[in-house]
Each structure stands twice: as structure tokens, then as C-alpha cells.
Amino acid sequence: MELSKSHKGREHEIAELFMATFSASEGTDEGQLIGDLASGLLRETPAEDLYVFTALADNVLIGAIFFSRLRFDGDPRTVFVLAPVAVKTDQQGQGVGQRLLSFGLEALRGEGVDIALTYGDPNYYSKVGFRQITETDVPAPFTLNHPEGWLGQSLTDQPLGSVTGPSRCVAALNDPAFW
């Protein structure tokens, strides 16, 4: 498996991966929603506000993750939120996602990003260092439907602590449907 920070020329393939993966697990409507999110992130987000990491096997896309900038009005630290994440259905359960997440987080550390956040399954994301946080300590852009899934980690030697909001996400994520 090859892990990469490059996604150029694979935009359509990435969007299709998200649509197929989420359609298989959550239904066609969710697949379309997340496929459109992936397309929107790729099309609309300035390069300095987006990281896309991919996993390839024999030059075939088997996984992809997005980190997009989350700005906090009262905090100077650099924060990126992980969303969405997809691993090809027939490749799930083989460590592809965990390796891709670890690769992405290490790349963010190397780029000087201070904090990584995500909104998802605490059991899964804790395997790569995410811990539950509260909306009081780290305000989300929208009220969370499942606040137990709000997770974060410091990518520096400093503790995460509180982050002073309010927060603003990139345009493609700026919809309460994702929160």
C-alpha cells in the first residue's frame, strides 16, 4: 500500500470512493451527501485550508481522508478538522484507515498544525490519539447531534486545553447536516 499527500488528478475517483463507501454502509442518500461533500471540499476549498491523503494499492484508490481548516476567532493556534474518511468497502478491517490516519496526522505535525479535531466514533479514532472533548472547551461550528463524538488531540508537545471560539469551518462543511 502506498500512502500519499497528493490527490491531483484523482478528484473524481475520490468523490466516487466516498459516494460508494457511504452508500454501502449508510444508504444512497448518505452516499450522495458525502460524495457531494468530498467534491465540494476538492472544488471549493483553498489549498492552504485543505489536506487530502490517499491510500493506493497497485495504483487503485482504496482510501482517502480530508483535513480542512477550522478557524477560532479567539485562538491563534492552527486547527484542522478530519472529515470525511473513507476506505473502500472490500478493504475495510485491514488497517488501511488507521495507517492513513496516522500518516495524515504525522504530516500535519510536520506542517506545524497545532490541533486536529474530528467528529465520529470515539472507539475508532482513539486508536490514533483522538480523545473526547466538549463543546464548552472546543466550540463546534454547529450544535452537535452526538456530542460524545466530538474528539480532538494536540499535535504539539502542549496539551489541547480549551480553544476560544466561536469556530468557522470551510464552506463545504458549513452545513448543520454534517454536524
Image (cartoon, rainbow, N blue to C red):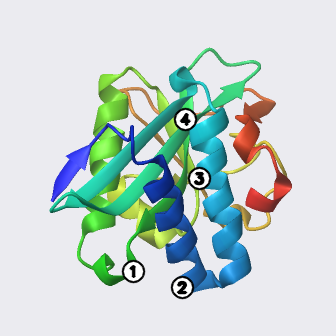
Q: Which mark is residue 24?
A: 2
State the separation of the CA atoms marked 2 and 1.
8 Å
| Label 3 crowd bin: few (<14), some (14–19), many (20+), radius 10 Å | many
Query: Which residue shows up at 44% across the image and 25% down it?
Result: 113
State the separation of the CA atoms marked 3 and 2.
16 Å
Marks 2 & 4, CB-CB < 8 Å contact: no
- Give whichever of 45, 116 is nearer the camera: 45
State the separation of the CA atoms marked 1 and 4.
26 Å
In the rendered image, residue 62, in percent from the top left (x then y), is placed at 31, 65
Q: Which mark is residue 38?
A: 3
State the separation of the CA atoms marked 2 and 4.
27 Å
Residue 16 vertical position relative to residue 105 in the rendered view, above or below: below
Decide which of tag 3 and tag 2 comes sooner along the chain: 2
Decide which of tag 2 and tag 4 comes sooner along the chain: 2
Reading the image, the residue beneath label 4 is 80
Marks 3 & 4, CB-CB < 8 Å contact: no
Mark 3 vs mark 4, foreground winner is 3
Quarter of the view holding residue 141: top right
Quarter of the view holding residue 139: top right
Q: Name the secondary structure under disc 2.
A: helix
Decide which of tag 3 and tag 4 comes sooner along the chain: 3
Query: Which residue shows up at 57% across the image and 75% down it?
Result: 22
Q: Name the secondary structure under disc 4.
A: strand
Decide which of tag 2 and tag 1 comes sooner along the chain: 2
| Label 1 crowd bin: few (<14), some (14–19), many (20+), radius 10 Å | some
| Amino acid type, residue under disc 4 in the picture | Phe
Decide which of tag 1 and tag 3 comes sooner along the chain: 3
Q: Is residue 64 left or right of residue 150?
A: left
